[in-house]
Structure formats: C-alpha cells, structure tokens
Image (spheres, rainbow, N blue to C red):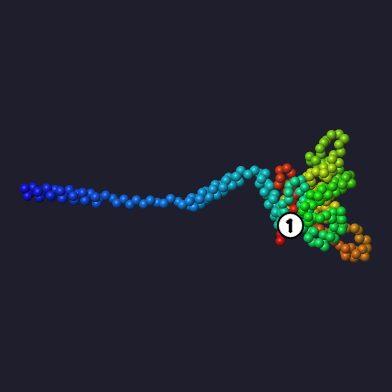
Amino acid sequence: MTAELENRQKEELSKIEISIKDDDLKPEINIQYRQGPSKAQRRREKLQKQEEEQDNLIVEQSKHRSEYELEVERELDQINQNLCIANLQLINIKADGNCLFRSLIYQIRQLSRSIDIFQRWMKKIPQFNFNYQNEDKEDEIIWKLRKATSEYLKKNRAEYEGFIYSLDTNAFDSKEEGVDQFDDYCNKLAETPMYTGQLEVSILAKLLNTNIIVHQASPTPLVFEGHTNSQINSEDDKKQKDKEQVPIPTLHITFHELLYSQGGHFNSTALIE
C-alpha cells in the first residue's frame, strides 16, 4: 500500500514538472500600442502635400504654355532690361484705349515736381499748362490732349492724309461713298477712347514741345523729337538765347506689341532711386 502511494506521487510530480517546462517554453508577448500622428502633424502633412501638388501643377502647366505667352514674356523681359540700362523702371498704365495719354501725363506729373524747369517749359506751351498733379483731372486732360491732336491732324491734312489711309485700323465706321475717312478718323480720335500709336506720339511731341522716347523690345528705342528752337542769327542773339535756354524735357514711355491680344499698349516709366 505504501509502495503504491509513493508511485502515484512520483507520477503526479512528473506531470507537474512537464507542465512547468512547457510553460517556460511559451514566448513572452509584449504588446506596445503606437500612438497615431497628432492633428497638428496631420495638418502639416496635408499642407505639404497641397504645396507639392501645386508645384507639380505649375511645372505641368509651364510645359503646355502657348508660344504666344512665351513671346509676351520674352518681350516684357527685354523691355525691362532696356529700361534698367537707362536707370528706369516700368510703371503699369490702365489699358483702356487712353494708355498713350495716361503714360505721358504720368511723365509730366513727375517732371512737374521740378517746379522751375516745369514752369519754364509750360511758358512755351501755355495751352497745355494743366493741373497735372491732380489725378482727378486726368480724364479731363486726356480729352483736351485728344482734341488738340485731332485738330493738329486736320490742320496738317496734306502731310498726314496718306498715312491715315494706309493704317490697318477699325477706326472708320463706314467705307461708304461720300464718307470722309480722314475726318472720321480725326473725329473718333477726339471723341472716343480710340487706340493711338506712333502717329499720335509724333504729333504730341510737337504739341508739347518735348522729346518722347519710346522704349520697346528692340535694343534701340524710338525717339520722337518735338523740341524746336528759333533760329539764331547773331552772337548777341546767341548770348540772349543762352540766358533764356529752357532744358529740353524728355518723356520716357514703353510700347508693348504683344502684351494684350487686342492690340499694342503703352506704359510709363520712373527713375530707379
């Protein structure tokens, strides 16, 4: 009886050891939960993704830009380079058909700050001694300049008639027989914001008794000389003339052939300070 009990105890102990050994063989599982990104981090990642998408879109669009857009950019770059050489910077002018007149008025407004030079200049052209400093008067001045340019054309019809007829323009309302196209052009010049070009620049240079330089994409600007001096016949006349000499004001504007699809455009300039 005692022997049988001992055998049964040994058998139970053996099972316990095997169970303990099996438990020792079980791997230890250490579970760690990783915390997700914060709201701020997610927001930063979203913004970064949007910026990357925008950059990719710009790159993709640049590949498909039209040749016309590239030509416009090249023209503007060249004009800015030419202005920089002359120590000038571009001043944007509203494109409303009156851009030539607005660009010149901006120039005159800058010159009017030199009171002595401006007053001596205006004495030579009293009919154009307007209040250029008052920007509220700009439209009123534009129509006065348009009217003066139109009247100059009419008075000098023989000189300009052939040029007017050669223009490729939509300024004429009618091609009907009996309609004077020259008068039609002059009337529209005076009464509407009709586009103006080199013809009007040359006339305004004469009317304002000044020189107008038109900077464009080509290396050499166009120069319209309107300043005139009376003839000097003697040494005494020369000395008197030197005393009364008025500095020749020069107005610097720019011409952009491609900037707007509907036609050429004039901008103004300012000195780089």
Question: In the rendered view, does 51 fall on the left or right side of 199?
Answer: left
Question: Residue 244: in sight, yes or no?
Answer: yes
Of 265 and 17, the residue lying toward us: 17
Residue at left offset 18%, top offset 50%: 16
Secondary structure beneath label 1: strand
The quarter of the displayed image where residue 251 is located: bottom right
- Please give the count of numbered marks on the rendered protein: 1
Q: Is residue 107 above or below residue 184?
A: below
Circle 1 crowding by C-alpha within 10 Å: few under 14, some 14–19, many from 20: some
Query: What quarter of the picture does the C terminus occupy?
Result: bottom right
> In the current view of this chain or complex, which residue is farthest to the left?
1
Question: In the rendered view, does 135 fall on the left or right side of 45?
Answer: right
Residue at left offset 74%, top offset 44%: 263
Question: In the rendered view, does 123 fall on the left or right side of 257?
Answer: right
Residue underneath mark 1: 270
Residue 226 horizontal/vertical position (percent): 84, 54
Q: Is residue 217 above or below residue 118?
A: above
Q: Is residue 75 above or below residue 86?
A: above
Q: Is residue 121 above or below residue 43?
A: below
Residue at left offset 75%, top offset 49%: 266
Residue type at mark 1?
Ala
The quarter of the displayed image where residue 227 is located: bottom right
> In the current view of this chain or complex, which residue is farthest to the top?
177
Question: Residue 159: in sight, yes or no?
Answer: no
Residue at left offset 90%, top offset 58%: 230
Question: In the rendered view, does 131 fall on the left or right side of 12?
Answer: right
Residue 4 horizontal/vertical position (percent): 8, 47
Residue 143 horizontal/vertical position (percent): 82, 48
